[in-house]
Image: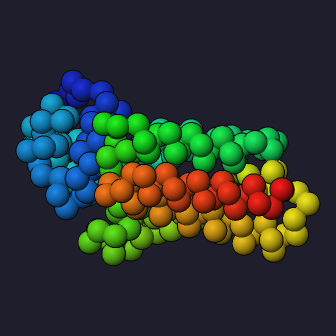
Amino acid sequence: MGRTQSFDTDEVVRAARSVFWAHGFEAAALPDLERATGLSRSSIYHAFGSKRSLFGAAVDSYLAEVVRPRLAPLTGNPVQPDALERYLSGLRAALLRADTLPATSGCLLVNTAGAPIGRDDEVARIVADYRAELRAAIGRGVRARLPQLTGAEQDTLADACTGLVVAAFALVRVDPAQAAGSLDTARALIAARE
């Protein structure tokens, strides 16, 4: 007879997510994952099969619990004209809030894109899908805010803002002020077209 699971899988995944987010997949040592999750190595492997599978669950959790709630105002129907401004200013505040994972570690998926695991085909697809989801949401925000622009102008602005958001995520670990500045630039680009 198999063992009865005595832990909450979602809580374990969230704990592991914090370790992967702060340290990256490669630097997330099994003892760190054991400490964070409260599980032994054998329990982690029994429940998830591998460190890589646990990472996959952490990424799914990150998308569902961190990324998509923040993007929700940009993906609803209808998108309000101020939704993109609220997203950018809320993200700016989150990146400047000391001692939080967004402020100290940026974006789990942007970080993953530059790590060795980012060359894994499945991980590369997940990162590309995330970037496309982010771009689509920002595009909807641009269209709601600036309906008078042509489709090509909206697309160019959405591409620029998406790049500035990704830059902010990449910079926040080393220069939070510059990360905030990237988001301010996105806001200024939008304001200049009003």
Instruction: Work out whether 42 lies above or below 37.
Output: below
Where does the image place residue 103, in percent across and percent down from the top left? Answer: 37, 44
The quadrant of the picture occupied by the C terminus is bottom right
Q: Measured along the vertical axis of the image, is residue 7 above or below residue 162?
A: above
Q: Residue at x 32, y 54 (%)?
A: 173
Above or below residue 164? Residue 85 is above
- Residue drawn where x is 60% and y is 47% of the image: 88
Residue positioned most to the top = 6
The reply to whether residue 153 is in sight is: yes
Farthest residue in the right direction? Answer: 148
Q: Where residue 145 sits in the image (x, y, percent)?
A: 81, 51
Q: Residue at point 32% right, 46% down?
A: 104
Query: Foreground residue, 140 or 142?
Result: 142
User: Where is residue 100 drawn, in percent x and y?
Assistant: 34, 37
Q: Quadrant of the N terminus?
A: top left
Q: How many marks?
A: 0
- Seen from the viewer's position, the closer of residues 178 and 133 is 178
Q: For residue 82, what is the image quadrant?
A: top right
Q: Can residue 134 be seen at all in this image of the molecule?
A: no
Identify the image quadrant of residue 9. top left
Viewer-proximal residue among 8 and 81: 81
Q: Residue at x 46, y 69 (%)?
A: 125
Horizontally, residue 178 falls left or right of residue 24, namely right
Q: How is the image coloured?
A: rainbow
Horizontal arrangement in the rendering, residue 185 relative to residue 111 (left or right): right
